[in-house]
Image (spheres, helix red, strand yellow):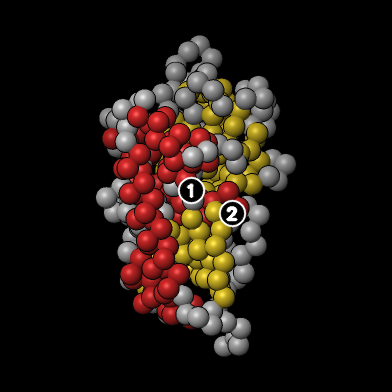
Amino acid sequence: MSSVAPRVVVVTRPTEYESLLARHGTRAQAAFFLQQRGRPLDELDERHRRREAALGVVSAAIPARWRRARIERADLSRFVFGPEDVVVVVGPDGLVANAAKYLRGQRVVGVNPDPRSYDGVLAAHPAEAVADLLPGAATGAGRVEVRTMVTARLDDGQRLLALNEIFIGHRTHQSARYRVEGAVGDEAQSSSGVIVTTGTGATGWARSIARQRAERVPLPGPMERSLAFFVREPFPSVATGTSLESGILLEGATLALRSEMDDCGTIFGDGIEDDRLEFGWGRRVEVGVASERLHLVRG
């Protein structure tokens, strides 16, 4: 066993209250801005207080001799996680997904600071549970869900990782033009883009798409080593088809697309459009089950 004290990395993101203060400078100016739009600042202030209270409980739960760090979501891409770190994410479920793509097997404790605002699917624990969860998370004991992730790899080696889903399409509201290639089939398509989802993402965006389909595709579970893909609003024409609207990708299989778009073709994961791959004309991408997985601590 290592003699080095464990390190807990607490991940947060700015609350709506903090974002308003950063934009408007003072509380009075932020309150005036909201009042002009019929919204009180008190509601956002209260959410902020609940988050701060949860952070206080989490901080107190970390043993005094352990090392600790706190980072914001914007710093995730620059932070160097150690292989033995325990990551405590305090915020909505999406923040767990944001952190997951930068981790390589570190255990994650998701804390829901505001159950009245967040579902708590991934960030499922109250702050008060952290004291009991940290020892097992640091030693490798305790119950862990190993959740499947999805990866997209371009033909030049660039790669994107996501926990929920990957979107491939046009950066604006124009139709995405591309050709499906490989084992799934071969077809030129024009659509609102393609979603490739994990079982974790199957409770969100992909679920709403699946519910609208006459032919239901069985969505994978969060720990199943498979993915589902959906073509959004495929358009039939003399040059494009609609026979490949959805399907399942087992581990080892990939969905391959070749872009027929200009420089506005894009690929991004988990709704983070700023962290994207460019998918311009002629580029080829393969999407499949990732070797990386999220290790989510459960009570």
Q: Secondary structure at mark 1?
A: loop
Mark 1 sits on what residue? 14
| Residue 68, quarter of the rendered image | bottom right
Q: Please say if 142 is above or below 97.
A: below
Q: Is residue 124 visible?
A: yes
Look at label 2 and name its amino acid.
Leu
Local packing at callout 1 (Cα closer than 10 Å; few below 14, some 14-19, many 20+) is some
The image position of residue 149, as x and y in percent, is 49, 53
Q: Mark 1 or 2 closer to N-term?
A: 1
The image position of residue 184, as x and y in percent, is 50, 38
The image position of residue 131, as x and y in percent, is 38, 75
Look at label 1 and name its amino acid.
Pro
Residue under the image location 72 percent in, 41 percent down: 156
**Where's the C terminus, which quadrant?**
bottom left
Q: Secondary structure at mark 2?
A: loop
Q: Please say if 99 is above or below 23.
A: below
| Residue 285, quarter of the rendered image | top right
The image position of residue 215, as x and y in percent, is 29, 33
Q: Is residue 138 left or right of residue 83?
A: left
Residue under the image location 28 percent in, 35 percent down: 211
> Quick one: which residue is furthest to the right in this view?
156
Q: Is residue 293 visible?
A: no
The front one of 71 and 268 is 71
Mark 2 sits on what residue? 76
**Where's the N terminus, which quadrant?**
bottom right
Residue under the image location 47 percent in, 80 percent down: 63
